Amino acid sequence: MKAIIQNEFGGADDLLHTDMERPKTNQNEVLIKVAFTSVNYADIKNRLGNKGKVIFPLMLGLDVAGTIEESSAYSPFSKGDRVIAFPKNGSYAEYVVANEKLVFKIPDSLSFEQAAAMPTVSILSYILIHEIGEVQKTDTIVIHSAAGGVGSMLVQVAKLLDVQKIIGTVGNLEKGDYVKRLGADIVCTYETFTEEVLNHTNNEGANVIFDSVAGNVTSKSLECLALYGTLVQFGNSSGKAGVFKTSDVHSSCRNIKGFSLGTTRKHNPGRLAPAAEKVLELFNSKQLTLPIAQVFNLKDAAKAHKLVESRNYKGKVLIKM
């Protein structure tokens, strides 16, 4: 089968298009013929070596959409079932293996392309809004990196909840109209969001702030987080740690919550099924959509990475097998 691997940490041009043996399944696993995979920012960090130790050759990728190729006699899946999945050893390949607990059937009416755009960002966003942030309709919330894949979904999921005020941040205001079309009420930059949030909340601050950037954005978020508010930290795309003091939280009754989809896939995969079922319903009924920025062939994975690194796109970047 064709696949993309890397033999060392490095730039996008270090991604190699090569032939590999088709992977073998173990008990409670299925083999999936991949139609599309998505490029997530975590792939960039993995490629650069910013996600910890790995074993080379390394295959990147978090999620796929495709069809079941092989399953065991007692599996809930059969050959030909249309699914989304989180494979166990990367997704940039024509065939992947996944734990059955991380595989979810998709409706026939949902295209593979749209299905491939959603697994990581939509399941994560649904859990962040409903379980971690516990967002209420009366809240004012801030969504950092609102034009990105997760940000695009967070805005839409919050809008479906009829959240009172949704404030999105972007690196470039040229993305402002896009974020507003998704459902944001206010869009501002990382340089001005603290003042904007305070201005639009009578200096009370936001009830929930979703931070995937970290670094200086974390400390600036605490400057505009309301009493009893929640800062949800679920990434550090800036590459820098967010810093806060215990005095930032205890006297103001605020709290900071962390969440990782990767940790949850590994240690508590069953937690994902209810969220997956719900977002699949929302996508199939077109209550949620995710724009496809561009689709690349597998051999052009390096070009896909360069586009994601440029941040000059809106929605999701896909790779087609």
Image: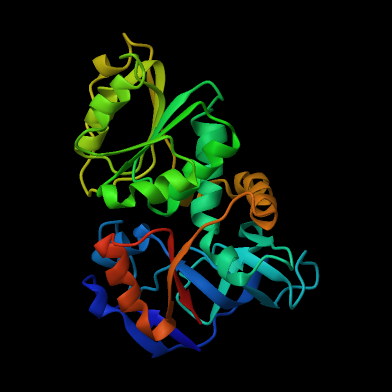
**Residue 264 appears at what percent x and percent y?**
51, 47
Q: Is residue 118 visible?
A: yes
Against 177, residue 188 (above or below) is above
The one nearer the camera, 139 or 280, is: 139
- 134 to 229, vertically: above or below: below
The residue most toward the top is 251
Nearer to the camera, 81 or 129: 129
Q: Is residue 39 left or right of residue 164?
A: left
- Observer-nearest residue: 105 or 202? 202
Q: Residue at x 50, y 55 (%)?
A: 120
Q: How is the image coloured?
A: rainbow
Where residue 186 appears, as percent x and y from the top left, is: 37, 35
Q: Position of residue 144 (x, y in %)?
A: 34, 40
Snapshot quadrant of residue 304: bottom left
Residue found at x 41% / y 47%: 179
Choose top left, top right, bottom left or bottom right for residue 249.
top left
Residue 285 relative to residue 223: left or right: right
Q: Is residue 263 visible?
A: no
Instruction: Find residue 107 and report its image quarter.
Output: bottom right
Report the residue at 71% width, 63% height from top: 105
Apparent side of residue 32 relative to residue 314 in the rendered image (left or right)? right
Furthest toward the right, the residue is: 74
